[in-house]
Amino acid sequence: MNAERGRGSAALRFVVVVGVMSFFADFTYEGSRSMVGQYMGMLGAGALAISMVSGFGTLLGYGLRLLSGPGADRTGKYWPITIAGYVLQMSVVPLLALAGSWEVAAVLIVAERVGKAIRNPPRDAMLSHAAEEIGYGWAFGLHEALDQFGATFGPLFVALMLLVFHHDYKVAFALLAVPAVIELSLLAVARLSYPNPSELSAGKAKLTTTDRMPRAFWVYLGAAALVGAGFADFPLIAYHFERSRIVSTELVPVFYAVAMAVGGAGSLVFGRLFDRFGMKLLVPLTLLSAVYAPLVFLGGFWAGLAGVVLWGVGTGVQESIIPAAVARMVSRDRRASAFGIFTGGYGVAWFAGSTVIGVLFGVSLPVVVVFAMVSEVAALPFFVAAARRVGVIDDPA
């Protein structure tokens, strides 16, 4: 009994340590993302360029996980791959202060997404070992809450810097070097304190005898891909707000901070509910978050704020429930690969959707809204089918 409590406590501490590390990582790069749309516009980029750069960054940010995930499982180098990704990501964000054109800024924005692609699958695989002890939903929900709270304070910090320094984006980007250094320091602490996270769970490892993923995995991926295709990236939303003068320049990062706060708080709740009810929870949450589109693209200030809140709900769902569900479907030795394959496919769909939304943006905002909502609602039967295949609707425990 004491041994089990000790493992549970160690697992919880690991989740918290990695969560605090993610707090400062998100403080850095989400602070950056809250202003890159406006920044690229200031440097001369148009709506299509902004949407395609964001979408392409998302594509690489997810697609390259097809390599980093299986690579981590094959080599067992979970920590080295994770560290390499964080170092790249934290290094390029402050360099945006030196970008002299939107093309240079685009390269750095994409490089930041590449860093995230490298580090996420092995990090999530390590977290999944702790999740076996304290619950998948709770572990990923708690981590994501800390992650999202960093994504809340980062944009708020940026908004304050833009106000203090009279909309000087370059100064705001340069100051993000501070949380980046803190994150890398915490990364070193986590590596030294938990050199082998697989020991956090004493349960007998269930290993696969085949490289194939279960059928439920592919059905679930189809559902998530449809959701991603209809989920507009925030830089385009920010560009719309500023171009239409719906939201002032200094308030756009605040709107993003609100979305991240909602996503973080929601992750805690959604994680607990997922451990109790399973994947059927995705049906009402997907319906709710789909309403973001008409509010954001067709409404005024307050409707836009409400839409950003629902956009934040969708973000929290995607970053907490989705990895928790994937971890349940596969054995330990295939989880980094599963996370990589799943998020890779998701990213391809997001890129395709972002490109379509960017093109439609120049044609008609109501058409953008229809595309986004139809895509997300189309995912619902796939979520239900995947849940039934893994048996979590009737037996989520």
Image: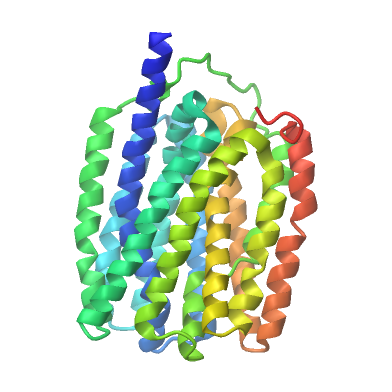
Screen quadrant of the N terminus: top left
Residue 3, placed above or below residue 118 = above
- Horizontal and vertical percent for residue 376? 70, 62
In the image, what residue occupies the spot 74% across and 36% down? 393
Screen quadrant of the C terminus: top right
In the image, what residue occupies the spot 61% across and 32% down? 328
Q: Quadrant of residue 19?
A: top left
Relative side of 201 to 323, left or right: left
- Horizontal and vertical percent for residue 133? 48, 23
- The residue sitting at the top extreme is 1
Number of numbered labels in the structure image: 0
Q: Quadrant of residue 349?
A: bottom right
In the image, what residue occupies the spot 38% across and 54% down? 149
Can residue 33 be seen in this snapshot?
yes
- Horizontal and vertical percent for residue 111? 38, 62
Residue 378, placed above or below residue 173 = above
Residue 107, placed above or below residue 112 = below
Residue 348, placed above or below residue 217 = below
Relative side of 280 to 143, left or right: right
Relative side of 107 to 96, left or right: right
Q: Nearer the viewer, residue 263 or 105?
A: 263
Can residue 106 be seen in this snapshot?
no
Colour scheme in use? rainbow
In the image, what residue occupies the spot 28% across and 68% down? 157
